[in-house]
Amino acid sequence: GAGVSQSPRYKVTKRGQDVALRCDPISGHVSLYWYRQALGQGPEFLTYFNYEAQQDKSGLPNDRFSAERPEGSISTLTIQRTEQRDSAMYRCASSAQGMNTEAFFGQGTRLTVV
Amino acid sequence: GNSVTQMEGPVTLSEEAFLTINCTYTATGYPSLFWYVQYPGEGLQLLLKATKADDKGSNKGFEATYRKETTSFHLEKGSVQVSDSAVYFCALSDHTGNMLTFGGGTRLMVKP
């Protein structure tokens, strides 16, 4: 595609529900990243993939968070049993390879847990 | 661990004023440094970068110089425009080049 596409743009969910956030990276990009951004703060790293392999998941806050990229393209970030503290903007980025090559960010998914 | 500290906003300037947004960092090894910009309603966009000490990144009239001795990467522009109003994020990548650490962001508002 022309850019990194994330869906949905906005998601409101009730506490305790599971949510799945989707990221469609730029075609051909090897690396895909997930970040979380609280209001008024900078993005914080969650996890990243090269192709379909999850290379680093050290930023995932707990085991309710998981991510996959089964075919090396589209990625899904899943949050199980959501809590109010999960409310944030979730940002996906992709790059040709590694963050030292230019990373392109999507518009993000604004998650609100009520 | 790595960290980035940038001046808090908002920064409010009149059109054609000089802009400086300070950024300092803490990192092991030799990180690459970046400035990203977020315009209202849009995703983060790379504005400029520098990959080694004394490099100067520049784009759209913005500049920043990688200063290893002061661990800084201050963003400057000689004459801001209303269209520069946005949130600016300083960031660094770790030695693997695979993860960005961001500062908290600085909101710039330029008035006509």
Image (cartoon, rainbow, N blue to C red):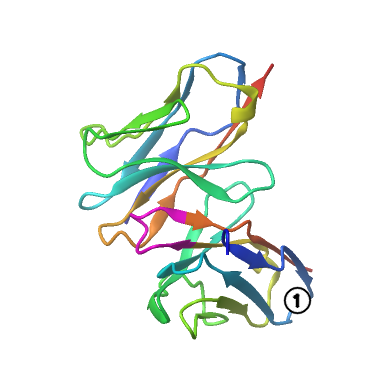
Q: For this view, does B52 lie left or right of residue B35?
A: left
Quadrant of residue A103 within the rendered picture: bottom left
Tell which of B66 and B63 is nearer to you.
B63
Q: For this view, does B94 lie left or right of residue A38?
A: left
Tell which of A15 and A10 is nearer to you.
A10
Residue at 53% over, 80% down = A66
Which image quarter holds the N terminus of chain B?
A: bottom left
Residue holding disc 1: A15
Prevailing secondary structure of the magenta residues = loop
- State the image coordinates of residue A101 (x, y, percent, origin top left): 35, 55
Chain part drawn in magenta: A94-103
Residue at 49% over, 16% down = B18
Q: How many marks?
A: 1
Per the image, label 1 sits on a secondary structure element best described as loop
- State the image coordinates of residue B48 (x, y, percent, origin top left): 41, 39
Chain letter behind tag 1: A
Residue at 22% over, 32% down = B54
Which image quarter holds the C terminus of chain B?
A: top right
- State the image coordinates of residue B55 (x, y, percent, origin top left): 25, 35
Residue B86 seen in render: yes
Residue at 36% over, 31% down = B64
Q: Compared to A59, does B95 lie above or below?
A: above
Q: For this view, does A21 lie left or right of residue A33?
A: right
